[in-house]
Amino acid sequence: MHKQNQKYPLGLINSCFLAILFFATGFSALGQESKNDSLIIEKKEAIHSPRKATIYSAVLPGLGQIYNRKYWKVPLVYGGFATLGYFINFNNEEYVKLRQAYSDIIDTDPNTNSFVKLVTDPKRLEPDRIGQLTESLRKGKDYWRRNRDLVVIGTVVFYAVNIIDASVDAHFFNFDISDDLTINWVPGPVMCMDNKLIGIHCRFTF
């Protein structure tokens, strides 16, 4: 009887030890699995490529913004190009019209008189004032050509901005810009005049 009573507590201890070992192994495996999941998530997030966003927007403006999930920027991109395209066309039409009028007024062919349609005051067609009209047509032609060329340059700049915007957004795609900001107060040793004192460390997390 005495021997059986000694064995029972030993078996109970062994059972408890095995249970603790089982749970410890389970928690370790769970922690390892959670760590692996975190690595997979980080790997997936790292797949977002600024190079792809840049190429997409270079090939088709707005496509890089779609790749970055900045869908609200797409109407701005195409709205900008539509506006610039309208002004290029408008300025070019005015330039072509005045260029033809200037060409007609300086030639010697009386049948080429498209400039007459542009004159609202008939007195400007008088021989003594035809020189002023010719100069006005030349200046007008140059004015509209310059405007057209400036808008073309603006379109090229806008195209470049579209590419740069996609590239910058892609670089900050995985960057945490939330408003969460925490302060942790941690007690710890602080060195003062070569003496170790008890102090508090302040840690910002954002």
Image (tube, rainbow, N blue to C red):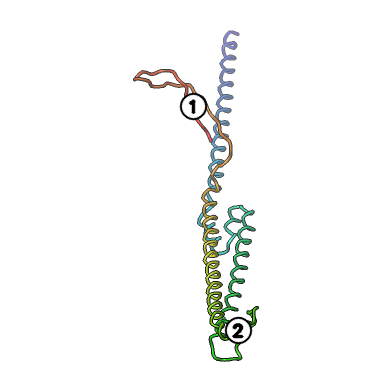
The residue at the point 57 percent across, 24 percent down is 20
Question: Is 89 displayed left or right of 171 in the figure?
Answer: right
Label 2, on which residue? 125
Amino acid bearing label 2 = Leu
Where residue 15 appears, as percent x and y from the top left, is 59, 21
Where residue 46 appears, as percent x and y from the top left, is 52, 48
Q: Is residue 46 above or below residue 3?
A: below
Label 1, on which residue? 202
Residue 71 lies in quadrant? bottom right
Amino acid bearing label 1 = Cys
Q: Disc 1, disc 2: CB below 8 Å? A: no
* Sequence-first disc among 1 and 2: 2
Of tags 1 and 2, the one toward the viewer is: 2
Where residue 16 appears, as percent x and y from the top left, is 58, 21
Q: CA distance from mark 1 to mark 2?
A: 85 Å
SS assignment at label 2: helix
SS assignment at label 1: strand
Name the residue nearer the viewer: 157 or 102.
102
Residue 185: numbered disc:
none
